[in-house]
């Protein structure tokens, strides 16, 4: 999925369904962002997330050899290369349940 395809998909959703909310959130587990849209369909409430993360270019570890010594891991990220992924969720029993996002990507 590309950024242009995400924008087209978001426009299609806004034209066809009632949108409850949309926005952008930072990633909890590292650099990147998550664009999301929550909308209502005949099948129920849905949430699509378009995740953009920088590509990892290197990994560094440091730590001791003794038992019980902590090991630290740090990553190097590209400033101009990004990876994208699409995640789809359906609201079931009071929580978001992930579903196959391929149906939305076509």
Image (tube, grey):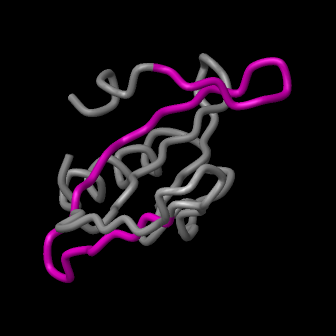
Q: Is residue 17 left or right of residue 53?
A: right
Q: Residue 77 in the image: state x and y as whole percent.
A: 26, 74
Residue 89 coordinates in the image, percent (x, y): 57, 31
Residue under the image location 60 percent in, 20 percent down: 42
Q: Residue furthest bottom?
A: 79
The residue located at (38%, 28%) in the rendering is 101
Taking the image as shown, residue 67 lies to the left or right of residue 7, namely right
Q: In the image, what residue occupies the spot 36% across and 42% down? A: 86
* Number of marks present in the image shown: 0
Which of 62/31 is in front? 62
Q: Quadrant of the C terminus?
A: top left
Q: Nearer the viewer, residue 64 or 48?
A: 64
Residue 98 located within the stretch drawn in magenta: yes
Q: Please identify the quarter of the rendering in which residue 57 is found.
A: bottom left
Residue lying furthest front = 66
Q: Is residue 12 above or below residue 33?
A: above
Q: Main secondary structure of the magenta part?
A: strand
Q: Position of residue 93 (x, y in %)?
A: 83, 18
Residue 77 belongs to the span the image colors magenta: yes
- Image vertical order of residue 89 relative to residue 31, above or below: above
| Residue sitting at x 49%, y 64% | 64
Q: Which residues are magenta?
A: 72-99
Q: Nearer the viewer, residue 21 or 67?
A: 67
| Position in image of residue 71 (x %, y %) | 51, 61
Q: Nearer the viewer, residue 55 or 19?
A: 55
Q: Residue furthest right?
A: 94
Q: Is residue 79 left or right of residue 75?
A: left
């Amino acid at each position: 999925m590309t950024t242009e395809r995400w924008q087209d998909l978001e426009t299609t959703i806004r034209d066809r369904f009632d949108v409850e909310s949309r926005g952008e959130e930072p990633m909890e587990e590292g650099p990147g962002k998550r664009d999301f849209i929550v909308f209502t369909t005949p099948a129920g409430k849905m949430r699509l997330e378009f995740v953009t993360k920088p590509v990892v270019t290197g990994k560094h570890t440091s730590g001791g050899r003794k038992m019980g010594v902590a090991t630290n891991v740090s990553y190097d990220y590209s400033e101009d290369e990004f990876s994208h992924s699409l995640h789809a969720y359906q609201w079931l029993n009071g929580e978001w349940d992930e579903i196959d996002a391929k149906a939305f990507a076509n």
